[in-house]
Amino acid sequence: MDAELILDAGRTVEADTDSVLFIGNATLLLRYSGFTILTDPTFVHRHEKVDLGYGLSSTRLTDPAMEIEDLPPIDLVLLSHFHGDHFDQVAQAKLDRSLPIVTTPQARDALHELGFPEARGLDTWERITVVKGERRLTVTACPARHGPGVTDLALPDVMGSVIEGDAQAALKQIYVSGDTLLFDDLEEIPRRHPDLDLGFFHLGGTKVLGIMVTMDAAQGVEAVKLIDPEVAIPIHYDDYDVFTSSLDDFIEATRAAGIHDRIHVLRRGDSRPLA
């Protein structure tokens, strides 16, 4: 059964224009359909480490484009999975603990233990509708897998997402891949959501102990072709030392595949309207 989350209608000031600001890694500030959404919050600075579990860590190579203290009021956090490069120690210490966080059931449980009681967990293809006054937003959990099958027990569950606005939204549907590799279950996404306007694709070719756990340039191209959004924006491509596949690799691959015309690159600090 689909869930519903009702927010205080006066919680935030509604933005005039639907837009996205790329803060870094997989952290986006989305103003969409009357809501302000923060994705995968990581705000550590260059040379600081984040925890990847099992005694592993990763070092940030860049600074975020914005400090967590400078964020506008947030309605909703969308968290693909619970890893330190997606929900870091700064987020754990400084995010408002009353914020609703939509994520996987596994990450929900971890967040509850950290004192974030409003975390909600979705299984694949479950939906939650967020209501604020007269505005509505639906988040659908989509398949994602953070590594080849043999590593599933050692890696966190991951959620891709389709975000769907109401009739006033600039775009109808937005896809966020989460940290995933290309695998068969992704084929169901375009079958259920054939008219995606915009897709954010987590790339980087992340390797941990020599095993690739996020899409590299070649897989990213195939994912864009499969999911088939009108516009594709690469993110999660150069912020941490575990990345092995650069943004330039992806851009070159999109040109070779003849899909570069639908790629829009955002650098840290860049923003663009969604209309």
Image (cartoon, rainbow, N blue to C red):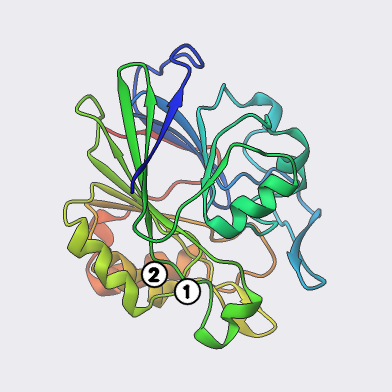
Q: Where does the image place residue 36, in percent across and percent down from the top left? A: 46, 28
Marks 1/2 in contact by CB < 8 Å: the verdict is yes
Q: Residue at x 62, y 77 (%)?
A: 207
**Observer-nearest residue: 66 or 103?**
103
Q: Is residue 274 visible?
A: yes
Q: CA distance from mark 1 to mark 2?
A: 6 Å
Residue 220 shows which numbered tag?
A: 2
User: Label 1: how many residues lie within 10 Å, few (<14), some (14-19) or many (20+)?
Assistant: many
Q: Tell me the kind of residue under disc 1.
A: Asp
Above or below — where is 45 with respect to 54? above
Which residue is outermost to the front?
Answer: 1
Q: Where does the image place residue 229, in percent across and percent down from the top left? A: 24, 55
In-image side of 62 versus 16 (left or right): right
Residue 216 shows which numbered tag?
A: 1
SS class of the residue under badge 2? helix
Q: Tell me the kind of residue under disc 2.
A: Gly
Q: Where does the image place residue 80, in percent across and percent down from the top left? A: 52, 55
